[in-house]
Image: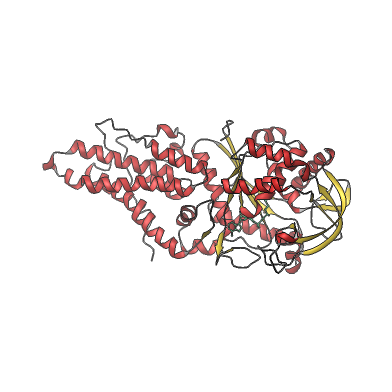
Amino acid sequence: MSKKNTFYITSPIYYATAAPHLGHMYTTIICDVVARYHRMLGHEVLFLTGTDEHGSKVYQKAQEARKDTQAFLDEQAAKYELMTDVLDISNDIFMRTSYDWHKKAAQEFWKRSFEHGDIYKKKYTGLYCVGCEAFKTEKDLDEKGLCPDHKQKPERIEEENYFFRLSAYGAKLKKLFKENPEFVIPEGKRKEMHALIEEGLEDVSISRHKSKLSWGVEVPGDSEQVMYVWFDALTNYITAAGYAQDEKKFKKWWPADVHVVGKEINRFHSLLWPAMLISAGVDIPKQIAVHGWITVDGQKMSKTLGNVLDPFEIVKQFPLSAVRYFMLREIPFDSDGVFSFKRLGERYEADLANGLGNLFYRVLSMIEKYTDGCIPQPSDDAVRTYEHVWKEYNEGFRAFRFDRALEAVWALLRSADQVINEEEPWKLADPAAKQEVKLNNLLYTLATICHHAAWFVYPFMPSISEAMFEQLGLNISEEFKHDVKKIALKPGTKIKKGSPLFPRLV
Ligand code: ME8
């Protein structure tokens, strides 16, 4: 974590070729959860998402749609922006690479790398997969000569292009990986990148002749060429932070704390991007966090394959909070995973309605009934800070293992259910039992667990967390002014029990 108390997180910027799908939703939710976690801890956060609006794929799609390219992009980008609203995404910036200020900054960056001697021109013949927006070698293709991810035959391209001297950065990247073992997480993904460095890196083509592709950022000093889409797209992360426009802002936010990406674009972020930055004399980001794929029948869900689920439809069928929770609880960050409505329904019932929702409702009902709707005064000095849970929760976040962070919280919730079953507060509440002190201590403990749970679930389910604070008689924005280590419920606080957090689905 940054010592500056700031935290800059980015999602990939998505190709504005078609409407967003579940894969984009997944990454964007992950970033939102991390951004909200840091804000909850009192850090100042910059969270970037957006759209990638250059390159062959975008251009071809606009042509197919028989639309003016920019008008087509405006329509597509609007869908991604709408996704951020519908999913309650708290991004600070929605970046579009067709913005003029981005183009200027990308050109400035190119010049720095050019001046450093890392950009040169040469004649080239290669196989280009439009789906990946990347050149392929024969060994990257399957037995039928198709790109294994997109099931498409790459185009043979022959032209004179600018190249970036990636081959010169093997030793520097090796050093970077050695000195920063967590530069790429999880470890398996770091090892894959390390193996590529060991195999030897080749220079990469970073421009296209305008006669072949005109839709891109013009190469400075050469009006016949446009930048290769990845060169332009990667620089969005610095331009959004103020590069070449606002020194003060840039100093505040850069280097980014983490770029979150899917595994198919790991190599662009973990190898090409750091090399480009070193070349241009800019600091490299602190971490690349690489997640697995949501698959359908064992294949990546993708626009090109056409096997996609629509985020807007999903949240019509299930409450948004449940979907956000489910995706991060069900699919471990480092694995591929399947999205199934059946599993979502099961987790809704078990973890949310019967788990968190039921416990919360039970505890507040008992406080209403036995202590006049006020948080009771405990008589003991039992420790109720749940440090062990916070530790596992924080470790889960550090490793991007949200499933583990949530499991630690749900273990706490289960322990609360168990205490209720063992101590039977309804018996303690019988005046004849003369157990008022014990009852107050128990209810205070249970309320405190609910209070901590409201914090814990905030990044995942912000509106549920807000409702929990409110029903506990608190206010979320006042709460978040407190240091998380010192949170405590004030005895005497009047609760405001409301309707169940997770109503039964019909
Ligand atoms: O690659 N499972 O854009 P893109 C999980 N513009 N995540 C998935 C997914 C799936 N099935 N499908 C997509 C690009 N994603 C470039 C990025 S960044 C400078 C430029 C998510 O529209 C995942 O994060 O193809 C993946 O890396 C990203 O969407 C790719 O989106």
Q: Residue at x 43, y 43 (%)?
A: 456
Q: Whole-percent x and y of residue 115?
A: 84, 38
**Foreground: 468 or 253?**
253
Number of numbered discs visible in the structure rendering: 0
Q: Is residue 354 above or below residue 171?
A: below
Q: Whole-percent x and y of residue 46?
A: 60, 41
Q: Is residue 99 visible?
A: no
> Ligand 1 shows up in which quadrant of the image?
bottom right
Q: Is residue 335 above or below residue 66?
A: above
Q: Is residue 213 left or right of residue 27?
A: right
Q: Residue at x 68, y 37 (%)?
A: 175
**Foreground: 30 or 70?**
30
Q: Is residue 237 above or below residue 302?
A: above
Q: Hey, which residue is sitting farthest front in the picture?
A: 199
Q: Residue at x 55, y 61 (%)?
A: 311
Q: Whole-percent x and y of residue 173?
A: 70, 40
Assign the C terminus to one quadrant of the image.
Answer: bottom left
Q: Quadrant of residue 490?
A: top left
Assign the N terminus to one quadrant of the image.
Answer: top right
Q: Whole-percent x and y of residue 397?
A: 50, 43
